[in-house]
Image (cartoon, coloured by chain):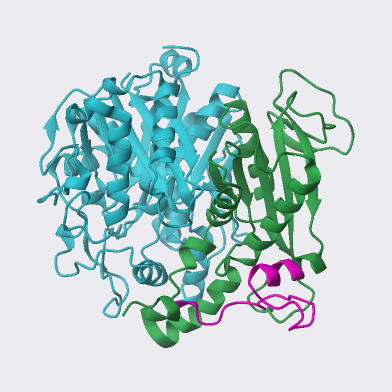
Amino acid sequence: LKHADDQTVVGLVALLRAIGVSGLDPTGFGHWGIVAAPRYLGRPTFDTIFPRFLAEGAWGVSPYLIPHDSLHSPSGTFSQVLKAHGPNLGVGGAPGGEAEALLTAATWLREDQAPGVWVILTGWAPGLSPDDYTRTDACCEAIALAVVPSGAGSGRILLDIAPDLVSMSGQDAPRDDESPELDLLRAWFVTPSERDRAVRADRGHDPAARPLGGRAGEGREPAEADAERPA
Amino acid sequence: MSDDDVWITGVGASTPLGHTFDAIAADLLAGRSGVGRVVGFPVAEHPSQIAAQVPEVPCPEGWEPGAFTRQPRMRQLVLWCCTAALRDAGLWDRRGTLRLALVVGLGAEWLVRWEAERLGAGEPPDWDGSEPGPIADSVARELGLSGPSAAISAACASGNHALAQARAWLRAGWADVALAGACDMAVTPISLASFGNLRALSRRNDEPRAASRPFDRGRDGFVLGEGGAMFVLETAASARARGAHAYASVAGCGAGSDAYHPVIPSPDPGPAVAAMRRALADARVAPDRVSYVNAHATGTPVGDAIEAKALRTVFGDDTPRIPVSSTKSMTGHLLTAAGSMECLACLVAIDRGALPPTINLDDPDPECDLAHVRGEAIPRTVDVALSNSFGFGGSNTCLVLRAV
């Protein structure tokens, strides 16, 4: 995770926490699918790399940019961690992608592509602006949802995907055999303070070495490309 | 034909080999390379200085050329491909009366956009003068599409995922017609440098047309490409009812993950084999009935050999009888759009009754022992074509197309 975007790291924490509280067998996701919907993934990394490109030319560009900061990157990482051999897909990429992610999960379940799908939604709140990375109130947040076909889970239905719209409900939703319903088993929201500790621990940082805060742009690896620069 | 059949009835593309089905088919079957030295920005300090580019995306009929060319190239590309596909399907004038869905693979939308902004190209307003938003939303709004839409990415496997998702939406009745495919415009300074520093690209800079050499013993990496293809999908019943020309049936889709590494393919071919077998089972096609395989084979030393091993596992004793080619030898690797480019190559094979070759395959690697279509196209009736697309993030996808 050294080169992963903050959204990938935070999404992973949410995923692991969700598994922990869901009661699902953590070794039982071998055929599950993974859908990740980040928002503007890689923007902080890009804004670190671009000045290096201007100063140093092509050799200043990290080889990890594409593998770790593209729309596909978080879902690929999550599948690797879970040893999940079902399909994995990045969806959306901007605000609004969450509905597309849920629609994708519903599609896979309907087509029997996977017995269940983890949907991981991530983003910064408030959204990062390249002109204002010094702001101290931006937090990276994530939600992990375990989604299974109706009838497969014992949980209360919190979310119903209808053919023409995606709606979320806090109430028990009526079952309609004509629509592809989903059981939302658990959602886990990562709080900012948990995120700070998680990011640092996963990156090998000493949590005590810096004050808590983990603000935008902090914790980036400053010279990623150097170690891998071809001779 | 079953009620579940979904057909491809329209094609729109802009590729290093051309912008129409006929032009692309002609080049693919003639074995012409679209690779050259990169134009548009200086590359003298880049480790790889070659690519298969799309110098200019055609302006669709009805758009004002000046306004069109001021749009970001990625948005131009998606719009051209969607427009051309709808016109090819004969649905352009009916698009407002249909629930028309959009599933488009766009892996590098935001990285490319930020790079253009920082390089001073800026981001013009959207078509209607509003702040620029996601391309899928913008194009859906511009074309008046009223069905569901999604932008997706499984890296180089995106195009096959898009077709699978669109097919599922049609089967579910969530849309009447769907536009599905993938586009990428990743030949940019940052992208070329990042892939180059990853040691993924060929450095055969002095021989651009000979640089992309899948399955060849002398391969040294892939050649970056750009472009895209979008397809109109509809149910067989819908297509037959309106007498539409069908390129092929989307007969089978399979997808899975290595769960191994963000970049390096699993040395165990099992996950890739599983995706292929899933697609064949979905299509109800026995392996020995496959007429042609368009391999993912990018020209990297590791990936080609693993795919060859996977193909041999799937086809067993039939391997020597089933022709395989990698059209990336001519088009370069279109990244997010690779699967769609290669779906298009399969449609060409079905439509023209000829198998596009792998060019530059002068010295086949014994580790890639397959029934290669070397150098020149082979006349052959194609009933069933299989197209593999594997991507970063460990994504494995396989598409089975059947002649209609």
The residue at the point 40 percent across, 61 percent down is B186
Q: Main secondary structure of the magenta part?
A: loop
Q: Is A169 left, or right, of A90 in this rendering?
A: right
Quadrant for the C terminus of chain B, please: top left
The residue at the point 55 percent across, 82 percent down is A222
Q: Is B60 left, or right, of B382 in this rendering?
A: right
The percent position of residue B210, horizontal first and vertical second, equals 15, 58
Quadrant for the N terminus of chain B, please: top left
Would residue A164 be counted in the magenta stretch?
no
The percent position of residue B221, horizontal first and vertical second, equals 27, 60
Would residue A221 be counted in the magenta stretch?
yes
Q: Nearer the viewer, residue B338 or A15?
A: A15
Q: Colour of chain A?
A: green
Q: Is B242 left, or right, of B203 in this rendering?
A: right
The residue at the point 34 percent across, 77 percent down is A230
The percent position of residue B46, horizontal first and vertical second, equals 30, 76
| Total number of numbered discs in the rendering | 0
The segment highlighted magenta reads: A197-225
Picture quarter containing residue B223? bottom left
Picture quarter containing residue A178? top right
Rendered cyan, the chain in question is: B
Q: Nearer the viewer, residue A128 or B23?
A: A128
